[in-house]
């Protein structure tokens, strides 16, 4: 006996199918990106809420640094895989430093602008300058600008921000010095090892000759 779409079970089944369809489409898009760009790892974060799916892209290579302007954009799609643009979505972005209290005001509220990247046209995007290294949470809230459009949704992405490049460069001379010391020590060890091996070899040859 076929299930009625009006029944609660039938509605839940349709919602589950729609959500799985959205997830499948998003992962297929990621696979296409990996093949076309020869990407070896998947660093993009995938989220689903209601009938909307989102992929967070942070340039470059999803490795932001503190104190540097970082471009972030969101590939939004509906359950059919259609791209949702900034023009049809009233989207807002809030940035929190983790951990944060529920009623704590956001650290940043960057303005979103439409961006065309790859095969995504007019998707929400912005530039974020994280003040220091650590973990941040990006909260993307949105709803359709039309009454008959998308339902309200919210996505939460955790982003790890590395230290400033200058701080990392200051550590490089120390690492080089340690590396040079290690090289100097390792250069003396092979000479002793070679000499010891030579003595053992000569001793074996002499022993065999004497036994004969």
Image (cartoon, helix red, strand yellow):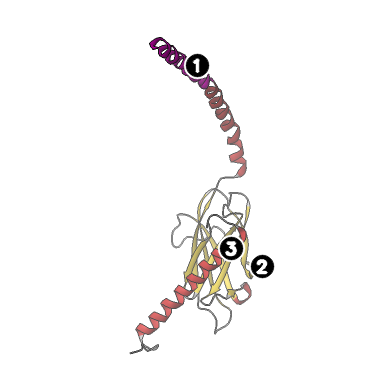
| Residue 111 visible in the displayed image | no
Residue range of the region highlighted in magenta in the rendering? 188-212
The part of the image, by quadrant, that contains residue 108 is bottom right
Q: Nearer the viewer, mark 2 or mark 3?
A: 3
Question: Residue 76: image x %, image y %?
Answer: 56, 70
165 or 147: nearer the viewer: 165
Mark 1 secondary-structure assignment = helix
Mark 2 secondary-structure assignment = strand
Asked if the residue under mark 1 is in contact with the one under mark 2, i.e. CB atoms within 8 Å, the reply is no
Magenta span dominant secondary structure: helix
Question: Residue 96: image x %, image y %?
Answer: 51, 58
Q: Nearer the viewer, mark 2 or mark 1?
A: 1
Quadrant in which the C terminus is drawn: top left
Say if 154 sits above or below 64 in the image.
below
Q: Nearer the viewer, mark 1 or mark 3?
A: 1
Residue that badge 1 annotates: 195
Residues packed near mark 2 inside 10 Å, few (<14), some (14 to 19) or many (20 plus): few
Determine if the magenta segment contains residue 81: no
Residue that badge 3 annotates: 33
Residue that badge 2 annotates: 116
């Amino acid at each position: 006996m076929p299930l009625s779409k009006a029944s609660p079970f039938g509605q839940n089944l349709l919602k589950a199918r729609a959500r799985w369809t959205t997830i499948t489409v998003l992962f297929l898009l990621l696979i296409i990106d990996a093949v076309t760009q020869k990407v070896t790892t998947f660093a993009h974060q995938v989220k689903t809420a209601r009938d909307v799916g989102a992929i967070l892209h942070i340039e470059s290579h999803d490795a932001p640094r503190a104190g540097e302007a970082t471009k972030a954009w969101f590939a939004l799609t509906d359950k059919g895989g259609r791209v949702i643009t900034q023009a049809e979505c009233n989207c807002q972005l809030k940035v929190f430093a983790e951990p944060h209290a529920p009623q704590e005001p956001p650290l940043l509220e960057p303005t979103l602008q439409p961006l065309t990247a790859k095969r995504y046209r007019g998707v929400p995007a912005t530039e974020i300058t994280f003040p220091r290294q650590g973990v941040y949470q990006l909260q993307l809230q949105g709803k359709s600008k039309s009454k008959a459009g998308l339902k309200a949704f919210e996505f939460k992405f955790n982003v790890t921000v590395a230290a400033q490049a200058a701080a990392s460069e200051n550590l490089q001379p120390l690492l080089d010095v340690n590396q040079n010391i290690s090289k100097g020590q390792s250069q003396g060890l092979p000479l002793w090892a070679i000499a010891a091996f030579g003595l053992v070899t000569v001793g074996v040859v002499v022993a065999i000759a004497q036994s004969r």
